[in-house]
Image: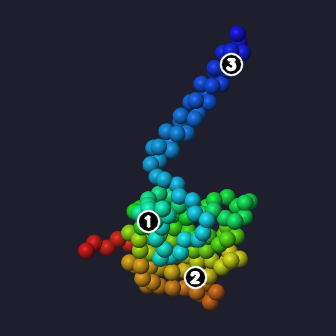
Amino acid sequence: MCSFFKVWENRIIQFLFFSNFILLGACQGKDKIFIKYPVGINDRLNSPFTKQPISGIVYRLFQDPSLEPKLVGELNLSMKNKLWTRWWDTGKPKYRGEYLNGLKSGLWLEWDQKGLLRFESVYLNGKVIQLKNCLLETCDSTFVIKPVKIKI
């Protein structure tokens, strides 16, 4: 009789754990999109079957099975928003910066395949307004990191 209650107790715990996991995923409200290729700067991601715009959190999968998927960024109707990172095939970051309404904005950093910082760039409305070559200049990341919003 005691083992009967133990089985039900375990099932109740499993149910509560599973239902909390599902509810947390539902509350998050964003689809997870896994890709097996690098996402370039001007690339737009659409549904591969319907070619319709997609929204959600994008993760990069790698050929090397020992590498965990890495967060790339967020899509809103196929438009890049917020922080985005492109990854080398080795799992090291290639570049990182923010998009505002699909345009590069604020400070962007770019690394080589060895992980050395190569460039610091500042973008405004998708255009470079300042660029530092970190091999020739001191890169100190003293730029404003927040994206700039312009009211028209």
Residue 115 drawn at (x, y percent) = 68, 75
Please state the horizontal and vertical placement of residue 12, each as a whole percent of the image.
Answer: 60, 25
* Residue at the image point whose x is 59% and y is 71% from the top: 38
On the image, the x and y values in percent for residue 97 come to 51, 71
Q: How many angstroms separate mark 2 from mark 3 (CA)?
A: 60 Å
Residue 51 shows which numbered tag? 1
Q: Position of residue 11 (x, y in %)?
A: 63, 25
Q: Relative to 7, say whether 58 is above or below.
A: below
- First-in-chain label (1 vs 3): 3
Q: Which residue is drawn at the image coordinates 45% and 84% (left, top)?
A: 128
In the rendered image, which quarter contains the N terminus? top right
Residue type for callout 1 = Lys
Q: Circle 3 is placed at which residue position?
A: 6
Would you say residue 17 is visible in this rendering? yes
Quarter containing the C terminus:
bottom left
Compare residues 148 and 48 and report the one nearer the observer: 48
- Judged by depth in the image, the label closer to the viewer, 2 or 3, is 3
Mark 2 or 3 closer to N-term? Answer: 3
Who's the residue at 47% across and 43% down the image? Answer: 26
* CB within 8 Å, label 2 to label 3: no
How crowded pointer 3 is (Cα within 10 Å; few <14, some 14-19, many 20+) is rated as few
Amino acid carrying label 3: it is: Lys
Q: What is the number of the mark on residue 36? A: none
Which numbered disc, 1 or 2, marks the residue closer to the eye? 1
Q: Nearer the viewer, residue 132 or 101?
A: 101
As helix, strand or loop, the secondary structure at mark 3 comes to helix
Badge 1: residue crowd in 10 Å (few <14, some 14–19, many ≥20): few
Query: From the viewer's perspective, is residue 138 above or below residue 1?
Result: below
Which amino acid type is shown beneath numbered disc 2? Phe
The residue beneath circle 2 is: 119
